[in-house]
Image (spheres, grey):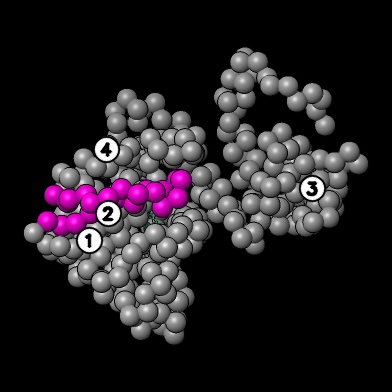
Amino acid sequence: MTTAQTAPPPSMRLRELAFGAACAAALRAAARLGVADALGDTPMTAEDLAAAVKTEPKPLRRLLRALTCYDVFSERPDGTFAHTGMSRLLREDDPGSLRYITLWCTEPWTWDAWPRLDEAVRTGRNVVEDLYGKEFFVYLNEDAPESADVFNRAMTTSSKQSAREVAELLDLSGASSVADIGGGQGHVVASLLEKYPAMHGTLLDLPRVVDNADPRLREGGSLAGRVDIVPGDCRESVPVTADVYIIKNILEWDDESTARCLRNVIRAGGPKARVVVIENLVDDTPSMRFSTAMDLLLLMNVGGAKHTTGSMVSRLEAAGLVIDDIRPVNPYLHAFDCTVPV
Ligand SMILES: C[S@@+](CC[C@H](N)C(=O)[O-])C[C@H]1O[C@@H](n2cnc3c(N)ncnc32)[C@H](O)[C@@H]1O
């Protein structure tokens, strides 16, 4: 155990920040080893935990000691380790689990890309195409299937957590069909179909993603009779007619892709279609450290960005949409409710 918990001086704080990769790596190691899953409500010694997760006890104690500095696990006076609010979130079975988000933020490709952040800032271009010779999502799905699975599971975790809030917020009475463009595994569309029992839904995403759609939407699922699953690339075309289009956490890539996706949705929906764009903003959020980090990661992988309210508005208006309303879904997520003009 360390001694006094006084705030470190700037010289030490900067050293700690410069070593931020060690903290991220320690979280990743704990998540991959399943340390949080092995620890229940009863505190355990490092030796017992090491036996449970099949590691050497001494290095596991060192890993735990590093993490306790950040309140991830705590060490008790008798030398045993216990859960904290944060370490519980590393458990796969925690209702608010962040295990896959933790893995996603620290996947192998991120460690290839971060050293090139200065290059991305200098050029304003993604670095992934230089690293792997192909677009990020193509690389992910063709060459890094484990990372693609982690991504899909991380997205599933965060969409499950926000899908209910999106469904609660959106009043779709009067509409008979909804399409979720780049809808991942379909949690938002499933929540909306459950809210509106007469509604028909469509989920469009890349083929490998919709192959793993939410079981409620797949053959034999409770909503299967009311949903079409469309594998496709929304930058190429959106072959879906619907009254309402949802585009959630998609318009974070390069401007040309954003413009093409919006153009295809507008063409598919036609005049009076409703288009609801949902995004985490970087100018109106209590999660500035997380959102700005994600913004830099987006610069490096897809040459994209998290939006400010203004940058989102200008892209939606440039595409020709009329913005009727901007509302928070929760403190971290905002909905831009738009209409295709007549
Ligand atoms: C950040 S996730 C958001 C998923 C979902 N909308 C949500 O909010 O949970 C981005 C999604 O865009 C999908 N995607 C990326 N490129 C795409 C493309 N060209 N066409 C369709 N979907 C795409 C990814 O597969 C992924 O599911």
What residue type is disc 4 on?
A: Ser
Q: Residue furthest right?
A: 78
Foreground label between 3 and 1: 1
Residue identifier under label 1: 274
Task: Read off the residue under disc 2.
Answer: 337
In the structure shown, which secondary structural element does the residue marked by tag 2 occupy?
A: strand
| Mark 3 crowd level (few <14, some 14–19, many ≥20, 10 Å Cα) | many
Q: CA distance from mark 4 to mark 1?
A: 20 Å
Q: Is residue 62 above or below residue 52?
A: above
The residue type indicated by label 1 comes to Arg
Labels 1 and 2 touching (C-beta < 8 A): yes
Residue depicted at x 78% and y 57%: 40
Of the residues tagged 2 and 3, which is closer to the observer? 2
In this rendering, would 180 be left or right of 239?
Answer: right
The amino acid beneath tag 2 is Asp
Relative horizontal placement of residue 337, taking residue 80 as reference (left or right):
left
Q: Which residue is mark 4?
A: 311
Earlier along the polypeptide chain: callout 1 or callout 2? 1
Q: Quadrant of ligand 1?
A: bottom left
- Magenta span: helix, strand or loop, mainly? strand
Is residue 337 shown in magenta? yes
Q: Quadrant of residue 123?
A: top left
| Upstream in sequence: badge 2 or badge 3 | 3
Residue designated by label 3: 82
Sequence-wise, the earlier of marks 3 and 4 is 3
